[in-house]
Amino acid sequence: MTDPETADRVYIEPVTSDTLCKVIRAERPDAVLPTLGGQTALNTAIEAAKTGIFEECNVELIGASIEAIHKAEDRELFRNAMNKIGLRIPKSGFAHNFAEVEDIAQRIGFPLIVRPSFTLGGTGGGVAYNMEELNRVAMAGLDASLINQIQLEESVLGWKEYELEVMRDHADNVVIICSIENVDAMGVHTGDSITVAPAQTLSDKEYQVLRDASIAIIREIGVDTGGSNVQFAVNPENGDVIVVEMNPRVSRSSALASKATGFPIAKIAAKLAVGYTLDEIPNDITGETMACFEPSIDYCVVKIPRWTFEKFPEAQDILTTAMKSVGETMAIGRTFKEAFQKGLRSLEIGRAGFGADGKDMLPDSVAGTDLEYHLSTPNSQRLFHIKYALKHNMPITMLHELTHIDPWFLHQMKQIVELENQIKLAGKNLPKDLLEKAKKYGFSDRQLAHLTRFTEKQMEQERKMLGLVPVYKLVDTCAAEFRAATPYYYSTYETECEPG
C-alpha cells in the first residue's frame, strides 16, 4: 500500500485524525478503507468521523462502517449483539469509573479479566485476583481506552482458545480462511501464545459449531466486506463455547493465516472493499479456483512469540491478557512436532529446538515449588520448564493441571523428549530408521550431533550418506487438489518433492 508503484501518493506522517483530515482535504479520495491498518486505523477512522470530515468531503468509508466498528470494538455493544444472535459471552459489566468497577467486582467476584475498549494488543488489560490488583489494572485500562470504558468479565482462565479467520463480501458470501488454536489456555494474549494452524484438538462437530458462530457474528456486526478475526473460548470439560471478541479488521492473526494457507487476505480484502465478490477473484496460486474456495492445508503451522525481557529489567516476566512479545516466528512442517522444533530454533535465542542442544536446565537446578510456579504461571521460559518436567518424568496429568495446556500438545512434547533419550542411548550407532524418525520429529543436525557426540558436519555427512535429504512440499491453498501455478514451499523429510 505504501509502494510508489501501487500508490499515487505516499505520506510519511503520524497516523492521527488530524493528519487523515488534512490528507482527505488535499487528495479528495472517493473512499477510505480503515480495516487494513490494524487497530490504529480503526481508532483513527472513529476519531475522524467525529469531525464530520467524511460528510464534508463526500468520502465513503468502505470495508466496515463506523457503526460496525463501534459494534465490534465497544464491549457493551458487542455483548448486546452476541445476546441478540444467541451466542454466549462471559458474565460481565462495564465501567467508566472506580465506583462502577467496585460494584461489578462485588457482583461477579474474582478473578476478573479487564478488557479496555478500542485498544491494540490488549493494552491496559489484565487479570485481577483481588481488589488491589483490580484498582491498578482498571486505572491502566480506563487510561488506555479510546472511550474510557473497560469491560470486567468473569474469568475463563484455563479454557482452550481458538480463532477463526473469516471473510465476507457484499453479496453475503462468507468463507473461513483458517482455524487457529492457542497452545496456551485462556488468560494469555493470543500474541503471546504459541498458536497452531489448523486447530489440532477440535472435533469436526466442535469446529462446525465455531464456524457457524463466526459466520453469524460477522453478519450481525455488519462487516460489509473483508476479513475479520473471531476468538472463542471452549471449556475442555464439557465443550461449552463462549465468544471472547471479534476484530473487524485484518489483524496479526490474518498475517499468520495468509502465510499458513497461501491465501492473500489483505489483497483480497481490498478487492472486496471496492466491490468484487469472492467468486470473482481468482486464486493467484492455483490459477484455477476462486477466492470463494476455502483453503485446505495438509501440513501444520506453528507460531512462537519472541520476548526480550532482558532489555526491560523492570518488566515482570509474566504473560497475561496484555501483549508483551516483540516478534514471532512461523514454521511449517508435516506434523506439529516438526513445525514446533523448527519454530523454536528460528527464535534467534540460541536454542536449536526443544532442547537437546546442551542448554537445557541442569538436573536438580529447579526446586519443586519453583518448578510448579514456572509451570502454572505463564512466562517466556515456560516451554523449557515443561521440557525439564518431562525429562524428570512428571505425569502428563499433573503437567496439564499446572499449565492448562491440552494433554494432546503435552503428549507431542513428551514424544520429542522420549525420542531424544533413544537417540542419546544409540549414540554414534544411530540406525537409519531412528535418524529418519528424528528428522521427521524436527530434530536439527546440531541437536543430533550433540546427542550422538558427532560434530555437526559429521552428522550432516552421515545423514546424506544414508540418503536422508529434505524434500519440498507445496503451500498451495488446496492440499494438492489442484495444480499450483505460483506456490511456495517448505522443507520436510519424506520420500519425494511435490511438483509445482
Image (cartoon, rainbow, N blue to C red):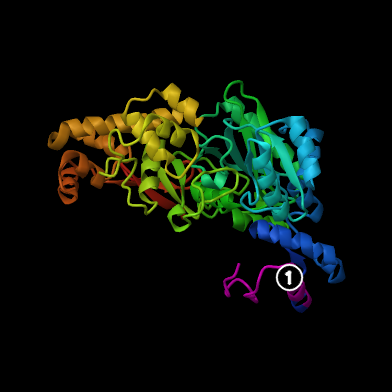
| Above/below status of 431 relative to 342 | above
**Left or right relative to 223: residue 159:** left
User: Would residue 23 be found to the left or right of residue 398 on screen?
Assistant: right
Q: Which element carries disc 1, helix, strand or loop?
A: helix
User: Observer-nearest residue: 355 or 300?
Assistant: 355
Q: Position of residue 200 (x, y in %)?
A: 49, 32
Quick one: 229 or 224, which is closer to the camera? 229
Q: Farthest residue toward the left?
A: 429
Reading the image, the residue beneath label 1 is 20
User: Can the viewer see residue 241?
Assistant: yes
Q: Is residue 495 above or below residue 348?
A: above
Q: Residue furthest bottom?
A: 26
The span picked out in magenta is: 1-25
Q: Is residue 38 above or below residue 29?
A: above
Label 1 neighbourhood size at 10 Å, few (<14), some (14-19), many (20+)?
many
Residue 360, quarter of the rendered image = top left
Figure quadrant of the N terminus:
bottom right
For residue 276, say whether it is visible.
no
| Relative horizontal placement of residue 9, taking residue 312 as reference (left or right) | right
Q: Is residue 18 magenta?
A: yes
Q: Quadrant of residue 185?
A: top right
Query: Residue, x 75% and y 59% (percent of image)?
Result: 62
**Residue 66 coordinates in the image, percent (x, y):** 80, 55
Which amino acid, mark 1? Leu
* Left or right: residue 44 compared with residue 414: right
Rendered location of residue 147, percent (x, y):
78, 54
The front one of 436 and 446 is 446
- Indicate the position of residue 53 as horizontal and vertical percent values: 83, 69
Residue shown at the point (74%, 56%) measured from the top left: 146
**Secondary structure character of the magenta stretch overall:** loop
